[in-house]
Image: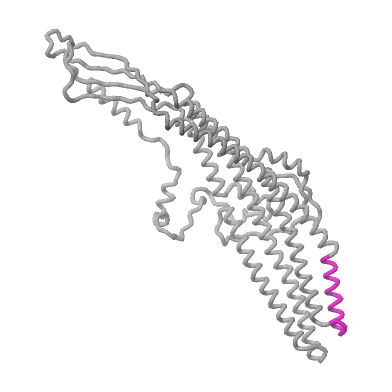
Amino acid sequence: MRASIVTVAALLLAGCSSPLRDGGFDAWVEADPNAWSAPGSSTTHRLDDLRPEEPAEAVPADVERLVELALRRNPAIAAAERRVERLRTRRPQVESLEDPMLTVSPVGDMAQTAAGEVGLMAGLSQKFPFPGKLEARGDAADRAAAAALADLADRRLQVAAAVRRAWWSLAYARQAVGVVNEDVQLRERLRDSAAARYRAGAAERADVLRAGVEVDALRQDLLELRQQDQTAAASLNRLLDRPADASLPDPPAATLTDAAGTLDGLLAAAADHPRLASLKQGIAAARDRLRLAKLDRWPDLTVGVTFADVDDEGLAPAATGDDQLYLNLGINLPLWQDRRDAAEAEALAGLGEAAAMYTDEQNRLAFAVADALARVAQRRDAVALYDADMVPAAEEAVASSAAGYRSGQNDFIALIDNARRLTTLKLMRLRAVTQLQQDLADLREAVGEPDAPSERNDP
């Protein structure tokens, strides 16, 4: 009998080894263990080490295709996907019964009975929670997984919006370089004109020096734009899980885009935002925790069976060696209610917290939609004003000032001021166009639709 019990125990222990593998993560760490333990290590570990790398030429010059690429490659999205997978495994863990308890008493002074001396005792017991407890735990676990799935959708929205914003920041920086370079050539022509008039005695040397200062000021602007280019490119590469200095294609010129839909319609669409869906699951999970706290006031049942192996030799002359088998029943006594009161109060507070967070997020999204929609309208009107009046008027003013300066009717300061104003207006117009695209990205994120409808017009 003892040999049988030992054999069963050995088989049970042999079944405790895991059949799962680590998916290559150990090799990922062991390839450079110092980089994971040494503070300040310069080693960068990317998901590319665990998946095929996208070829460099796969980076498109279209923002929406770039968003698709980021949604496939972004590590934050990969982490959110793994979180969903992880939380979906929670229900079987929390809903299953605890392992049964096997007890064996093979040594020591065993009991003497009328049937003989007890040689070995073994017991097997199983705890059964009060009806509804396991279901409540499983429901709470399902809510957490559902909330994680909504968080994944929200993360995808955030990444898509971040890619669009970074792309249009890159577009502004690179296209602004072209605008400034054109104006550098204009200022150089003005400088040459001032130098020629100075040599002819028709202008002061201060005009030549002032023109040179204006050229240098524009070159300083070019340095700042190159820094903005590098920052925007590094931000975009981070979202694509690429090295910060990886090359990116030049963005095409932006088209003027209007948001399609009224404020009321967009607010109605935002009611299905993944962030609200996640918070709804949080409210449901809080209710499950409250239900579990109430159920915890009821006792659990433990059922067991005990076997006694009795020898046929003992102190009693009539020892028969008959083995013993009997059933055990037990419950825990929920006498200490303070912790249960506190657990129920905590669950109630958590429910109120979750409801308040939902209301706050509703208000935040409503503001975000209204604010982004107002910014889109303002940018669109500003671009129209630049195109219809301000930029043409500034160009005409520069041409008129240049003609007047050449004829001696205007001074050089007025010409430089008009040229500077033209450069500023061109950059403001370009900034408004790219910010319009960024505002639309904010609007899409706030509405919760990665492919929100829009109306496109000619640039």
Is residue 296 visible in the rendered image? The answer is yes
Magenta includes 403?
A: yes
Q: Is residue 241 left or right of residue 107?
A: right
Relative vertical location of residue 256 with respect to residue 105 in this rendering, above or below: below
Q: Residue at the location (78% across, 45% down)?
A: 260
Measured as percent of width and height from the top left, residue 354 is found at 57, 38
Percent position of residue 456, x then y: 79, 50
In the image, is residue 13 above or below residue 380?
above
What range is drawn magenta here? 390-410
Residue 141: x %, y % from top left? 51, 33
Horizontal relation, residue 381 to residue 14: left or right: right
Q: What is the quadrant of the N terminus in the image?
A: top left
Side of 53 where 330 appears, left or right: left
Q: Quadrant of the C terminus?
A: bottom right
Question: Which residue occupies the foreground of this view, 204 or 70?
Answer: 204
Residue 351: give x, y in percent of width and height. 55, 35
Q: How is the image coloured?
A: one colour
Residue 353 position by quadrant: top right
Residue 144 visible, this orientation = no
Q: Is residue 26 above or below residue 305?
A: below
Dominant SS of magenta comes to helix
Residue lying at 59% horizontally and 47% vertically, measured from the top left: 72
Task: Establish if 184 lies above or below 445.
Answer: below
Q: Nearer the viewer, residue 303 or 227?
A: 303
Front-most of residues 20 and 262: 262
The residue that appears at 79% across and 83% down in the rendered structure is 193
* Nearer to me, 445 or 343: 343
158 in the magenta segment? no
